[in-house]
Amino acid sequence: MSYQSETQHQIAQKNRRPAMIFGAVCVALIGAMALDTTVVRIGSDQDVRQQGFSPERFGAEKFPEIRAFVKDKAVDAKTLFDEATADKKAAGEKYGVMAGIAPVMPVTFSGVVGEGKSGTFYVAIDGMEDAKVRVQTGPAVNGTDLRDATGTISFGDFTNQIEYQNAGAGINNAMKAEVLADLDRENLTGKTIEVTGVFTMLSAKNWLVTPVELSVQ
């Protein structure tokens, strides 16, 4: 081999060396990325976390727990009314769960539906002539009484205030889908209904009840 050919061979070898090193680095990098990559199945817990907070999913998960709690703790409306009008604070401490400035009270009753507006109806309950009891039947259900009913869902469970508010809306929507979807609101006045639900006791005589169960007799 001539001196010139040997020199060209050495130059070619030197030129190939950086390319080989670069290729080896790329292979190592791809390998490291593969080791650090987790395959996430659609619909799995990891997939749910990556999608972020879903009020509808949260509501569907929590509403059955809330309904079971309210049904277990619900107080007869007349009993609650008598005790609350005698001593509202004591009744709240005995039966309710504090949420902000007032307790959320679980209650059950049967009564005759009166006039209504925007899906909220007055209900006449025997022995409670001095009370104003209203029931939310949708399509809009307002408030966070269902969210706050158990005392187990708190602001610290969420990223921010918006998520906390949306959690309440998600629970309300889940309740509407399960409890109120087939309700004939147009022909509800004059009917007897049985209700189990919750209300925030700002007043001993003025209740706005959000149901967890509602049936028409």
Image (cartoon, helix red, strand yellow):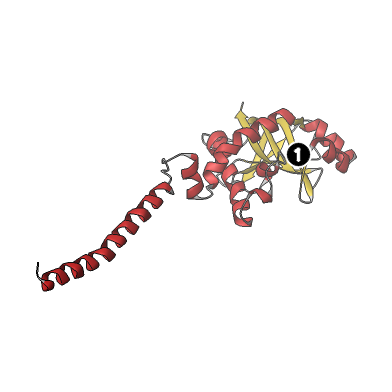
Residue placed farthest to the right in the image? 86
What quarter of the picture does the C terminus occupy? top right
**Disc 1 residue type (three-letter):** Met
> Is there any visible trace of residue 47 in the rendered image?
yes
Q: Residue at x 90, y 39 (%)?
A: 86
Q: Please give the count of numbered marks on the rendered protein.
A: 1
User: 174 or 53, which lies in front?
Assistant: 53
Q: Position of residue 162 (x, y in %)?
A: 60, 56
- Which of the 4 image quarters holds residue 14? bottom left
User: 17 or 154, which lies in front?
Assistant: 17
User: 42 or 193, which lies in front?
Assistant: 42
Instruction: Determine whether the residue tagged by mark 1 lies in a helix, strand or loop.
Output: strand
- Which of the 4 image quarters holds residue 18? bottom left
Residue under numbered circle 1:
105
What quarter of the picture does the N terminus occupy? bottom left
> Is there any visible trace of residue 118 in the rendered image?
no
Label 1: how many residues lie within 10 Å, few (<14), some (14-19) or many (20+)? many
User: 37 or 71, which lies in front?
Assistant: 37
Q: Residue at x 59, y 53 (%)?
A: 163
Residue placed farthest to the top in the image? 217
Q: Position of residue 77 (x, y in %)?
A: 77, 33
Q: Residue at x 55, y 47 (%)?
A: 55
Is 163 located above or below residue 88 in the figure?
below
Residue placed farthest to the left in the image? 2
Q: Position of residue 51 (x, y in %)?
A: 48, 49
Relative to residue 7, is residue 114 drawn left or right? right
Q: Position of residue 57 (x, y in %)?
A: 52, 42
Q: Residue at x 79, y 48 (%)?
A: 102
